[in-house]
Amino acid sequence: MVSRPVAARRRRPGVPVALLLPALLGLVFLVLPLAGLLARAPWGSLPRRLAEPEVLTALRLSLQSATLATLLCLLLGVPLAWLLARVAFPGRRLVRALVTVPLVLPPVVGGVALLLVFGRRGLLGGWLDETFGITLPFSTAGVVLAEAFVAMPFLVIAVEGALRGADQRYEEAAATLGAGPWTTFTHVTLPLVAPGLAAGAVLCWARALGEFGATITFAGNYPGRTQTMPLAVYLALETDLQAAVVLSLMLLAVSVTILAALRDRWITSP
Amino acid sequence: MSAAGEPRRRVAGDTPLPHAHPVVDRGAIRLDAPLLDAHLVVDRGAFRLDVPLRVAAGEVVALLGPNGAGKTTALRALAGLHPLTAGHVTLAGVDLDRPARRAWVPTERRPVGVVFQDYLLFPHLTALENVAFGPRRHGVDRRTARETARSWLTRVGLAEHAHRRPRQLSGGQAQRVALARALAVAPSLLLLDEPLAALDARTRLDTRAELHRHLGAHPGAALLVTHDPLDALVLADRLVIVEAGRVVQEGDAATVTARPRTEYVARLVGLNLHRGRADGHTVRVGDGLALTVADRLDGDAFVAFRPSAVALHPTRPEGSPRNTWPATVAGVQRHGDNLRVQLDGPITVAADVTPAAVAQLHLTPGQRVWAAVKAAETHAYPAAG
């Protein structure tokens, strides 16, 4: 007759099966392919395969170009984010929308667009070739360009958000202490948004590392020059499945490391 | 680095501050001219700030007023964080802002230091680096700047907290670091925005005393913005009281407390204040109530008396030279050891009575009583001028 009130009170409100079931299915759907990758990995031959020169070349090229692309994004993206966050100019909403286009654009389309501008016969490519003798398509610089094009929105959005959240009165305080606008930016604003900047840069780097579509379209697939890890995975898939699995594992490891590094900032919900 | 006509900033070294001031420095400027000569006019929508302000070297002026009076706008205009609509800010003979002549010196080139209400210490820097920030921006090398900062932290008693970050400091400590940071560039004009408002009562007492000491040692002009009359009375040499963007009263603490000119000021200093027409020893106030006063004057006049001067009686008191009138109790509140009774009637008045008297008179809201004030307890003075 008398129920146990303590136990009853502790029971959380019921979870509808209609939500629970698809939720679990969704989880399995996301995790299962990764588990498959681990299950099919040739663990025995892993060290030998990782040491193969082609793998190491692709890995080095990937890390280098992703890092250079991130630096390029920082150089151009942070001022752009600052402009969007701090300067009220006509058409700011339009500019913000334009900045996010590469986020939703299929990367292959981005690659084609880059070719049309920086290609030998492109809008700027011809001039660059004639004036400076610079050819971007199908070069390592082209890889960096393609990756930066696709990854920059991640950085701009993260940094703009951080700038909007930063208390601008610190900048006023800096001015009263004799700091001009540039010094204030470098000595006060940037340190204040450092966490957001770091998160944006890591996200940008991860996106650049995984870039495939724009890279293969704009820079091609030349081992040692433009063949990054994702391209190598795709190529290996047609000849040597085991090699593709090994390369994929390596990219997975890098991704998980980044997730772990960002877990406090991005994964934890407020 | 500094262009012609630009105010110079001096940076305090390890040695005591050079007490040479621009007013003294420059032969062209009269010694008795105020260091700061400003007429602040700022339009902000329907609100208009119109405040003339003069502060001499070594003087501490308090800008006192209720919230929304325009105090912070005035401070921001002086610091260059908000441009003037009209008028001028002239510091040591240099126009920092004068729209009529298109003169404008940006914040970072004004010899003005600011202690902000919530201090705004840079969270990514230590206390020492916060204080060294100003000297560094004025071209002082890193080592000298750190030495300057250390000497300032020592002066405010925080030498051992030099390497703490702002979030590791208590409110009182953060306030002192903010003061040291503002003073480390030896500003000609020091601005303090509600410097004690963020502190608890106990810390406020100590910090106020210490702030008083540092303000006394500051050779430049100092302007304190506050809504706390106690801060203003303790820290400032002169009070400028603003209401709704205008100066309503100005003077030293004694004058302002003895002769308030607005309801707000009277409330601040704890006086009953009524305006009326004087004819000899009689001042007609409110709905024709004639108050007999000790002072003799004619025309537009104020009458002020302390709440403790008001006596309450159950019936009309007879045979004493008092002003009496019937009143209704509007409310009773604690006030120190006594109780403050708000009275309605021909004039609204606050009366301070003992708890015993309240019990004896059964004072509850709506209760009818007689209020009495002796002529000798009143202070009447002309309202004009």
Image: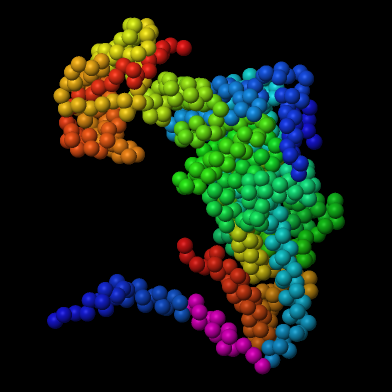
Residue sitting nearer the eye, B209 or A17: B209
Above or below: residue B227 compared with residue B298: below
Residue A13 screen position, x and y as percent: 29, 71
Question: Is residue A131 at least partly visible in the picture?
Answer: yes
Q: Is residue A32 magenta?
A: yes
Q: Is residue B366 left or right of residue B30?
A: left
Q: Which is the main secondary structure of the residues drawn in magenta?
A: helix
Residue sitting nearer the eye, B167 or B374: B374
Identified at 71% across, 17% down, the residue is B30
Residue B17 screen position, x and y as percent: 73, 37
Residue A183 screen position, x and y as percent: 71, 45
Q: Is residue B371 left or right of residue B253?
A: left
Q: Which image quarter: residue A208?
A: bottom right
Q: Quadrant of the N terminus of chain B?
A: top right
Above or below: residue B142 compared with residue B245: below
Residue B327 screen position, x and y as percent: 21, 24
Q: How many marks?
A: 0
Identified at 50% across, 26% down, the residue is B253
Above or below: residue A73 compared with residue A34: above
| Residue range highlighted in magenta | A29-44
